[in-house]
Image (spheres, rainbow, N blue to C red):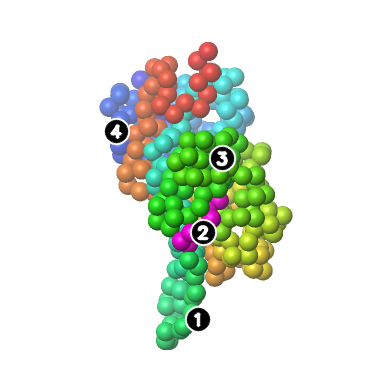
Amino acid sequence: MDKVFISRRIPNKGIETLKNAGLEVKVWGSAIPPIHEELLEMTAQADALICMLSDKIDSSFLKKNTQLKVISNYAVGFNNIDISTATELGIPIGNTPDVLTDATADHAFTLMLAVARKILDSNRSIVENKWKNWEPMGFLGQDLRGRTLGIVGMGRIGQEMARLCQSAFDMKIIYFSNTSKPEIDKKMQAKKVSFEELLEQSDVISVHTSLNEGTKSIFNKEAFHKMKKSAIFINTSRGEVHDEIDLREALGSGIIWGAGLDVTNPEPMSADNPLLSLPNVVITPHIASATVDTRANMALIAAQNIIKGLKKEKLIGFVNPQVYK
């Protein structure tokens, strides 16, 4: 009987799917993630692994676990896994694409609204007993209707964010992407622009790109200084895409107007991080995909990837299909 180790508790839909397939399932029992040594120890006893985006599955880890027949990342991203080494070792890697598109775009949209209308800062004034009367000049936010939305990374999530903003606020859509999207250009009257043009023209910038050498710290001091002083920065992709010190400086000195983050750099963020005290920032703890249905469907796909991988079948989310060649 093949053994599967899951590095964190996931919805039962995934666990039961594995058990119904006749697999032995071991789930990490603590709310505190396993440290690297613990993950190594538990994985060494398994034939397959379901890991989290926060688990470092590097070359060294993989070479110590060559017995693994398949790894499924409980995420759409997979920058935590050394794909090249996994492929060399013949280990198929799966992810959970598509199922979190709507939930993540909805969350980016929510962050945009929360920042634009100063929701968190105004709520904090009530909690701190500072709300004494109605103020004509209190907590003035920004209108979004007819403004320009700049999307960085026009994949499925970026496209859905663009659709939401256009439908709700008739926003003009521009985007920066490695590839042109003629069907999106036509459907949304969107326009592909250079990164510099996007920085200069956007009223809201929403980041949906993958993390790689080309996108790491792409939003830095230089980038923030090219943005409008009224600009809102939204990041629901990866924290490493923005330089957090540069972002804090830009927000604190009025270089840009506000920011909404679901991802931070580093992650998790410490409770004394200066960003948390700024009135023009809304931060959530990486919860963009956190709906009951989305997380359950992620668990199901992660489990199906494991089952298919053990049978040497094509995975649903297949990161390195060349491994079967």
Residue positioned 65% across, 55% down in the render: 200
The residue sitting at the top extreme is: 325
Element under label 2? loop
User: Which callout, 3 or 4, points to the residue nearer the camera?
Assistant: 3
Residue 34 on the magenta span: no
Q: Are marks 2 and 4 in contact (CB under 8 Å)?
A: no
Q: Which residues are magenta?
A: 144-150
Q: Residue at x 42, y 86 (%)?
A: 133
Specify the amino acid type for callout 3: Ser
Circle 4 sits on which residue? 16
What's the residue type where badge 1 is placed? Met
**Mark 1 sits on what residue?**
137
- The Cα–Cα distance between marks 1 and 2, rounded to whole angstroms, is 22 Å
Please state which of residues 295 and 110 is positioned toward the viewer in this rendering: 110
Precedes in sequence: disc 1 or disc 3: 1
- Name the residue carrying label 2: 147
Of the pair 122 and 160, the residue shown nearer to us: 160
Residue 253 sits above or below residue 234 on the image: below
Question: Label 1 crowding class (10 Å Cα cut-off): few <14, some 14-19, many 20+?
Answer: few
Q: Nearer the viewer, mark 3 or mark 2?
A: 2
Asked if disc 3 and disc 2 are in contact, CB closer than 8 Å, the reply is no
The residue shown at (47%, 21%) is 69
Quick one: SS at disc 4? helix
Above or below residue 311? Residue 168 is below
Q: Earlier in the sequence, mark 2 or mark 4?
A: 4
Q: Mark on residue 210?
A: 3
Q: Nearer the viewer, mark 2 or mark 4?
A: 2
Residue type at mark 4: give it. Glu
Q: How many marks?
A: 4
Q: Earlier in the sequence, mark 3 or mark 2?
A: 2
Residue 9 lies, in percent from the top left, at 39, 42
- State the separation of the CA atoms marked 3 and 2: 25 Å
